[in-house]
C-alpha cells in the first residue's frame, strides 16, 4: 500500500526523522512559478518550507505545521530552496538547506529552531566552504555527518577536491563518476569540522562505479540510514531515475553497490528518506502523478520497506 501524504499541495524531496516519539517530515515545497523546464533545474523555483508530522505515516493524521522558513528571511538568498534535512542536538533543531546565493551558486545554509516543527531562524551566512545541494545528516555516537551533492542543476560538476573549477567538467564514461561528499559537522553544528571527502561507491570487484554506469552511479539525493550495524548510503541515479543503495562499514565508506530500492516514478526526479518508526521501516518519496506528470510539481508518498534475511532491500515498483 502507498499513500499520498499531502494531497492538497505539492511537496517533494522528503527528509524524515523521529523526534520526541513522532515522525517529522521536511519536504521541498513545489509550486508553479512559470519558469520553463531546463537541464539546469530552473523550474524547481521553490521559495519556502513547511514541516509535517504524524504518529502513523500510513493511516494517521498528517499535521501541517505551516511555513517555517522562507527565502524572504535569508539574508544571502538568491533563489531555489531545494531539498533540506534537520538534525537535533541538545534540544535545538538545525535545518540544513541548499539555496543559490546572489551569484546563482548553490551553498548550504543552517537555520535553528527550539522545536522540530520550527519556525527556523537562518544564520546570516551559508556554511563556509559549502557547495552544491541535497544535504542529509547522520547522527552517530554524538557526531554529525552531512552527505551532500548533486549533478547538473546541483552544480557538483563545478568542483574537484572542494575547489571550484573554471568550468563544469564531467569525467569520461570509463572514469570514476563524480561522487557525493561527506563531512563531519562542527560541535556547534554551524560549520564543517573538516574538508569534505568523496563518498566512493564501488562495484562487487571493489572498483569505483564509472561515470558511464548511469543506471548505478551517484547523481543526487543522498540519504544515510543504519540497519543491523551497517551503513546504507542511498541516492538517485538522476537521468536513469532510480533510487539505489550501497552498504559500508562506517560513515565514510567505501560503500559497495547493492541494488535498486525504487524503480522510476512518474516525473524526472526521484528522491527519498528511509526511516524506522514503531518497529516498521518506511520509504518516503515523491512522484508527479497527481500533477499529471509535471516534473516540477511533485507529491509526497510513503510505503513500507522490507529487507530480506541478508539485509538486502526488496525493490519497490515506482509505478505502484
Ligand atoms: O527539488 C529539487 C531537486 O530535485 C532536489 O534537490 C533533487 O534531489 C531533486 O529531487
Image (spheres, grey):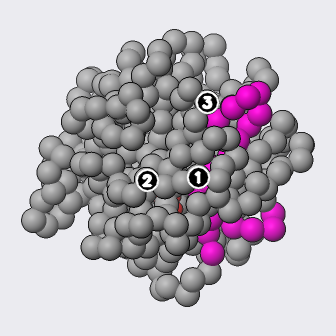
Which residue does the numbered mark 3 point to in the structure image? 91
Q: Is residue 124 visible?
A: yes
Q: Which residue is mark 1?
A: 120
Q: CA distance from mark 2 to mark 1?
A: 10 Å
Image spot of residue 306 (x, y percent)? 69, 27
**What residue is at 76 percent from the left and 54 percent from the top?**
65
* Element under disc 3: loop
Left or right: 171, with 150 as reference point: left
Residue in the foreground of this view, choosing between 130 and 181: 130
Quarter location, residue 298: bottom right
Tell me if label 1 and label 3 are in contact, CB under 8 Å. Answer: no
Magenta extent: 7-31
Residue 39 sits in quarter: bottom left
Kindly identify the residue that appears in the image at 58 percent across and 35 percent down: 92
The spot of residue 301 in percent (x, y) is 72, 52
Q: Quadrant of residue 31?
A: bottom right
Q: Is residue 206 above or below residue 177?
A: above
Amino acid at each position: 500500500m502507498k499513500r499520498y501524504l499531502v494531497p492538497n499541495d505539492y511537496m517533494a524531496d522528503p527528509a524524515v526523522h523521529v523526534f520526541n516519539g513522532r515522525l517529522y517530515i521536511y519536504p521541498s515545497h513545489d509550486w508553479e512559478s512559470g519558469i520553463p523546464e531546463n537541464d539546469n533545474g530552473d523550474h524547481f523555483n521553490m521559495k519556502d518550507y513547511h514541516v509535517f508530522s504524524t504518529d502513523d505515516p500510513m493511516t494517521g493524521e498528517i499535521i501541517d505545521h505551516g511555513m517555517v522558513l522562507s527565502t524572504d528571511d535569508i539574508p544571502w538568498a538568491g533563489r531555489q530552496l531545494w531539498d533540506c534535512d534537520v538534525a537535533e542536538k541538545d534540544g535545538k533543531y538545525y535545518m540544513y538547506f541548499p539555496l543559490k546565493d546572489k551569484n546563482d551558486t548553490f551553498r548550504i545554509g543552517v537555520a535553528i529552531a527550539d522545536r522540530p516543527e520550527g519556525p527556523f531562524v537562518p544564520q546570516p551566512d551559508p556554511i563556509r566552504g559549502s557547495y552544491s545541494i541535497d544535504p542529509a545528516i547522520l547522527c552517530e555516537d554524538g557526531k554529525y555527518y552531512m552527505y551532500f551533492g548533486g549533478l547538473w542543476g546541483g552544480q557538483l560538476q563545478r568542483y574537484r577536491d572542494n575547489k571550484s573549477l573554471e568550468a563544469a567538467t564531467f569525467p569520461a564514461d570509463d572514469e570514476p563518476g563524480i561522487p557525493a561528499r561527506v563531512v563531519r559537522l562542527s560541535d556547534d553544528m554551524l560549520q564543517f569540522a573538516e574538508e569534505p571527502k568523496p563518498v566512493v561507491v564501488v562495484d562487487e570487484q571493489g572498483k569505483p562505479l564509472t561515470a558511464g554506469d548511469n543506471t548505478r552511479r551517484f547523481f543526487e539525493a543522498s540519504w544515510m540510514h543504519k540497519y543491523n550495524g551497517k551503513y546504507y548510503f542511498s541516492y538517485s541515479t538522476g537521468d536513469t531515475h532510480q533510487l539505489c543503495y550501497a552498504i559500508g562499514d562506517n560513515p565514510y565508506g567505501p560503500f559497495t553497490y547493492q541494488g535498486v530500492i525504487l524503480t522510476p516514478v512518474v516525473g524526472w526526479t526521484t528522491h527519498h528518506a528511509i526511516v524506522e518508526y514503531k518497529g516498521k521501516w518506511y520509504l518516503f518519496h515523491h512522484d508527479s502523478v497527481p500533477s499529471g506528470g509535471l516534473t516540477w510539481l511533485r507529491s509526497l508518498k510513503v510505503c513500507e520497506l522490507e529487507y530480506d534475511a541478508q539485509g538486502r532491500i526488496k525493490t519497490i515498483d515506482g509505478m505502484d
